[in-house]
Amino acid sequence: MSHSQNIEINTASSDKKMLIAMGGIGIICAILIVLTYETTAPMIEKNKAEALERAIFKVLPDITKTQAYQLNPDNTFTKSTSNDSKLPKVYGGYDDAGKLKGIAIQANGKGYGEVLNILYGYDPMQQKIIGFNVLESKETPGIGDKIEKGTFPDNFKAMDVSLSDDGSTLRNEIITVKQGEKTQKWEIDGITGATVTSRAVGNILNVSAKQWLPKVYKNVNSFTVKTAEQ
Amino acid sequence: MSTIPQNKSDKGFFSSLANHPNTDEFTRGLWRDNPVFVQVLGMCPSLAVSNSAINALAMGLATAFVLLMSNILVSLLKDFIPKQVRIASYILIIATFVTIIDYVIQAVSIDLHKNLGAFISLIVVNCLILSRAEAFASKNNVSKSILDGLGMGLGFTFALLCIGSLREIFGSGSLFGYEFMPSNFEKWVIMVLPAGGFFSLAFLLLIFNYFKLKKEGL
């Protein structure tokens, strides 16, 4: 066939043609993606904020109001007024009487696949984790997504996260144990068949709790006093 | 797998649209060569995200959009893409539209995006889309490719919607979240579990093939 001859004769020019084709398609695709990203970004932002608000109500039972607080560089918490602030945030939840019921904290880390983004509720009075919600997950459907279903979330209904005596870290590290072997209040009952994901949840919580809880506990008054003024 | 009869006599844009054989490019995907019920392509999303009608509809429409757009672009660029890099180019084009639909779904509803989860990204490797790009769009003009993409896309959506509705009606006693079954109806939990996907698909394939054979007089 003349087809194969053509290829031999035009090797140099066909190389160039391939490069131009791939590069050209790449540029077209990049432009399309950027355009879509720019148009949808504000809507996605708004949707994510609403989803976060709903999740806060899920992890902190019996609240009627929420308020965002930012962590300042000097380790104090102040009310966050603008959404643009790049400082890390936590969310206080209050009942009708304005009483602090708990604080919702976002945590993320590596799951089995991509980043796993979770939100948990912390009750500083009892020093317990009282709620758990998955904000974003790309875990394997049917396997890793079991962390949102069944009895796994029950691990976080009254999980002991009391601080050590000097208040600088947790008294007991949060760990994930094998399914059915949970004996302590700071252990997470793992999921057989979703070992990596359930362990990842334990690690993410442990790292985040160690980092956040001492600061939140020490400054618990900045959450209650501010609302009294409201 | 079905072989696709191709009409080689292209007479240009508008005449080919009005031409009679071209209506076939559209209707073929809806019924006779239905991607799920006849070609049995794209089984992974058809079984996995069809546990409720709304998930199935969203997944079907997302796939249809990607299929239509990739068909258009592949058909437009078919003379420009060298044979040696065609598959790489198709994948690049398909992946672009999947990224776009991913952003769009997030903008419409975060909950829906969460329900469909990893399956949105997996549209990239849905063999239905690549097979239409390779077997049809790269050999036909834009208008035919649009009709083919629409037909196959809607056929896929229709099939997913059938499976999804069946599973939701029996598994949750509702349709599109609207509960209509009497309160003493015992939900067939297995229908929303993965096994229910296989049951539903097998049941629908049975019906489909029964009518097909009957029509052929066998």
Image (cartoon, coloured by chain):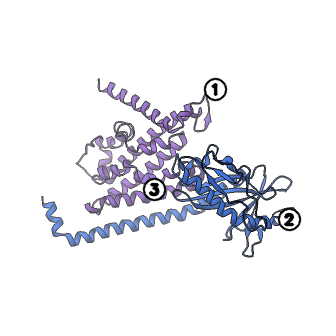
Chain colours: A blue, B purple
Circle 3 packing at 10 Å, graded few (<14), some (14-19), many (20+), is many
* Residue drawn at x 49%, y 65% as measured from the top left: A35
**Residue farthest toward the left in the current orientation of the protein:** A1
* Residue B201 occupies quadrant: top left
Of badges 3 and 2, the one in the foreground is: 2
Chain of the residue that carries numbered disc 1 in the rendered image: B
Q: Is residue A84 left or right of residue A4?
A: right
Residue denoted by label 3: B98
Q: Chain of mark 3?
A: B
Residue B177 x/y as whole percent: 60, 38
Tag 2's secondary structure? helix
Asked if residue A148 lies left or right of residue B62, the reply is right
For the residue pair A67 and A17, the one nearer the viewer reads as: A67
Whether residue B49 is visible here, answered yes or no, is: yes
Vertical arrangement, residue A214 with respect to residue B196, above or below: below
Picture residue at 53% right of the left edge, 51% below the top: B117
Residue named by callout 1: B182
Q: Which residue bears the numbered disc 2?
A: A225
Residue A46 visible from this viewpoint: no
Subunit bearing disc 2: A
Picture quarter containing residue B198? Answer: top left
Q: Are marks 1 and 3 in contact (CB under 8 Å)?
A: no
**Marks 1, 2 in one chain:** no
Q: Secondary structure at mark 3?
A: helix
Marks 1/3: CA–CA distance: 40 Å
